[in-house]
Image (cartoon, rainbow, N blue to C red):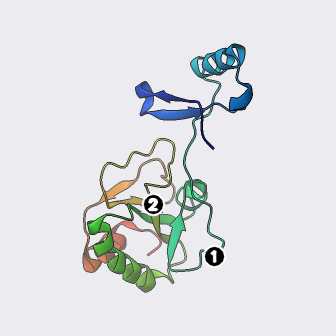
Amino acid sequence: MLPTIRILDPADNMKKFNYEGSIDSVTVESLTTFIESFRSGKLSAFLKSQDIPEDNSAPVKVIVGKSFKDIVLDTSKDALVEFYAPWCGHCKKLAPIWDQLAEELKDIKDLVIGKFDATANEVDGLEIRGYPTLKFYPKGSKGSPIDVEGRELEELKTFIKEKSSAY
């Protein structure tokens, strides 16, 4: 809804903090309270997220900001995630390989192959600098993903064989 009032924090990776009051009835006092709440750390950052898909039964799981913690950071599963941009040519080239990888490995119970549109979703603490970015989140160590370098099917399958405890 526009217009909006937002604080952008350049000291903290440009996190966004939205004013929750009505723009039509904004006052000096309400803005002062908003700024003081920001300064004292009482506000939660605004993070973009698409809606969680109603059907996520395809071999490649669609991960959004709202489902990231439940899917990727699930300590009972390994997760291999592609962070992509829909307009990215390299991402479009990787898509059929990613789909084939997920199809071939779909029966591995504790392994999730997922994709995350990093232009439409955000996760606190996650910084993606280029597309596609591939990260492997081993179960039990969800704070420390492993960067994945390969982009060909056999390279990705070898990586999973070597790194996944679910394989």
Residue in the image at 47% along x and 27% along y: 9
Residue in the image at 48% along x and 65% along y: 78
Of the pair 128 and 34, the residue shown nearer to us: 34
* x, y percent for residue 143: 47, 47
Identify the residue under disc 1. 55
Amino acid under disc 1: Asp
Amino acid under disc 2: Asp
39 in relation to 138, above or below: above
Query: Would residue 35 appear left or right of 121 to someone viewing this image?
Result: right
For the C terminus, the quadrant is bottom left
Residue in the image at 38% along x and 80% along y: 101
Mark 2, Cα crowd under 10 Å, few <14 / some 14-19 / many 20+, is many
- Label drawn at residue 97: none
For the N terminus, the quadrant is top right
Residue in the image at 59% along x and 74% along y: 56
- Label drawn at residue 117: 2
Quarter holding residue 38: top right
Of the pair 100 and 46, the residue shown nearer to us: 46
* x, y percent for residue 52: 62, 63
Nearest to N terminus: mark 2 or mark 1: 1
Task: Tell me how far mark 2 sits from mark 1, CA to CA.
Answer: 17 Å
Quarter holding residue 89: bottom left
16 in relation to 161, above or below: above
* x, y percent for residue 58: 54, 80
Q: Secondary structure at mark 1?
A: loop
* x, y percent for residue 72: 52, 59
- Visible in this render: residue 21? no
92 in relation to 96, above or below: above
Q: Secondary structure at mark 2?
A: strand
